Amino acid sequence: MNTPALSVRHNHFLHGGATAIPRPRSIATSTSPFRVRMSLQENGPSVAVVGVTGAVGQEFLSVLSDREFPYRSLKLLASKRSAGKSMKFEDRLYTVEELTEDSFEGIDIALFSAGGSISKKFGPLAAQKGTIVVDNSSAFRMDENVPLVIPEVNPEAMAHVKLGSGKGALIANPNCSTIICLMAVTPLHRRAKVKRMVVSTYQAASGAGAAAMEELVQQTREVLEGKEPTCNIFNQQYAFNLFSHNAPVQPNGYNEEEMKLVKETRKIWNDMDVKVTATCIRVPVMRAHAESVNLQFEKPLDEDTARDILKNAPGIIIIDDRASNRFPTPLEVSNKDDVAVGRVRRDVSQDGDYGLDIFVCGDQIRKGAALNAIQIAEMLL
Amino acid sequence: MNTPALSVRHNHFLHGGATAIPRPRSIATSTSPFRVRMSLQENGPSVAVVGVTGAVGQEFLSVLSDREFPYRSLKLLASKRSAGKSMKFEDRLYTVEELTEDSFEGIDIALFSAGGSISKKFGPLAAQKGTIVVDNSSAFRMDENVPLVIPEVNPEAMAHVKLGSGKGALIANPNCSTIICLMAVTPLHRRAKVKRMVVSTYQAASGAGAAAMEELVQQTREVLEGKEPTCNIFNQQYAFNLFSHNAPVQPNGYNEEEMKLVKETRKIWNDMDVKVTATCIRVPVMRAHAESVNLQFEKPLDEDTARDILKNAPGIIIIDDRASNRFPTPLEVSNKDDVAVGRVRRDVSQDGDYGLDIFVCGDQIRKGAALNAIQIAEMLL
């Protein structure tokens, strides 16, 4: 899920016109163009974006603007290679600066998405200087001193982190698959307590970065033309195919992506007893993940109650129209904030009302990464 | 699974050249072109293929030839629309005949793949005339008087059906997802008894017929060109997207495809107690299905033993290379007979050795339909 620095903002296809990615009105859209932006404010925090040229870095800017996140100043940081580039944001021109040890002087909040090794090196440095770091990499997620936060799920984990206290901190953004899964499952867990969860994912190209999205497009063109597909990012054909997630496989046979779902769920729910298994699969879809989730509960929970709970859950939209066979799809949630849930039904393989099957879709770059990080930053305001 | 009559034999892309569909040597390939075909034999049965112009009908011919199925005579049957067409098979020209009530006079074995309503009308008629019907539709699968057979799994279910006895019969071919799943799971079930199975599918276009495969290609071209995708077969964009299986949803919230997995598993295993749940999803892949399967066993079964059992199971190939992250993919099993299994690992969400996760891929048109039907016919010889 770490995303290399390569901008996709200008690729119309990846971001989808009205054609490729229909936007039903029922899903939250961006703010109206008629509103006057008030985000540049004297009393806002000073903000830095680390890895600003990457897919998630660019989405950080897009979400900051969409949500009118207040800021006194904005610093755009990237590697030496990108330093000096000009970038327009909310009608002002910024120059991308090289990330160095001195970059965080006077910075209140830094949003990191430049890979785990950059986070490991510069995150603690920034925190020492009094910056609150919201980190999108996996570097600190399982560090017991670092809160791992989905704002709708466990805001209490970061209650001790205060802006303006002069004390810096690290806060970790969970992995995309975990965020999308727990957005849907947590409201049900609060009511009936999940004992065991079996997850199978259908993950988009975007999780492997902008270059992977471009490779999928290129390969698809090549296969349609009868040519040999180009395999740079992945070691096999991705177009019209799918494969086990490319994260390294651990000695227990699970890949790292799967174990993130297992371990992060326990930490976020603060429940070391919850049983989770996952099979993570990469499918030829652009930027939104889907997940098939089977749930076993401690207390009974019928499907109508489950649907009511989800209907009232923040950040969730229900698409569950059995008569017209309309359920969540990755395309429908692409470029959207909300996570969509459907196929809510009593599990016929469990007795009584102790089991449910659901199907969940969420935008990997947005709620799976940039949006969640900025919601964390908003809780500091 | 039901495949409308529309030939795809001449679409190079769908069937894949060396480019799109690499064929590893480890998977069984077709018979050598140097062998002299001996299938047209005086002492072979008289064979009819019903729905010969469809994708599965065409695959029937291909598999009959590959496996040198012996036949005394061959009758190619289809709707009135296709009657009169010429079709070459094993160096002889045949004329496609219209399917009528009189088509089965003197026919020993009839392979049906022309949809449920044709099977319902003509299957019992043929059986009355002494023909043994192997039916690929869902018409008779749950009929308690009709055996539902995967030859590697439950050959005993059709032991009472004898060729040359003068008595006709109906034998049903299971649904593609069920065949592919049970090919992998049955060898493990025999050793450790499956108590509960949670399946999530990744299903190819071919299951919805040749026209659906063509629509996926067309839509993909259109999306790459920035055009509105054409939606005829499916009611939404399929290219770079995925969606809940298009089978009608039943009152219990499961779609028919999912309930086939639930019910057919019970019948094939002759085990009314086995618990099965399934979530069936259509992914933008051409002709092979993938399935993520979570298993709960009655008796312990460690992953090494499971791998050994699968290694020796007929019709199964193991692709499970953790070090190089190489596991089964739909592309790798396309146009292949064997079902591939990988990601075999102890389920971390279950105590001890009572649970396994596996990932399975199989060609939907071949083992999922035509090959399985012809293997059933072979057992009659």
Image (cartoon, coloured by chain):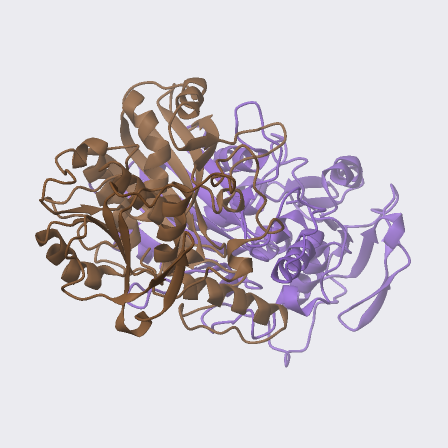
Chain colours: A purple, B brown
Determine the residue located farthest toward the bottom in the rendered image. A34
Taking the image as drawn, is residue A312 in sight? Answer: no
- Residue at 87% x, 41% y is A101
Residue B109, x across and y down, in percent = 21, 48
Residue B42 horizontal/vertical position (percent): 26, 43
Q: Nearer the viewer, residue A375 or A8?
A: A8
Where does residue B195 sit, x and y in percent of width and height?
26, 29
Q: Looking at the picture, does residue A371 appear above or below residue B341?
A: below
Residue B88 position within the rendered picture, expressed as x and y whole percent measured from the top left: 41, 59
| Residue A62 versus residue A362 in the image, above or below | below
Q: Is residue A271 above or below residue B97?
A: above
Q: Considering depth in this image, is A148 or B171 the residue closer to the camera?
A: B171
Residue A100 in the figure: left or right of residue B83: right
A94 vs B276, left or right, is right
Residue occupying the far front of the picture: B42
Q: Does residue A69 appear left or right of residue B174 in this picture?
A: right
Residue lying furthest right in this view?
Answer: A84
Q: Is residue B63 visible?
A: yes
Of the 4 image quadrants, the one containing the C terminus of chain B is: top left
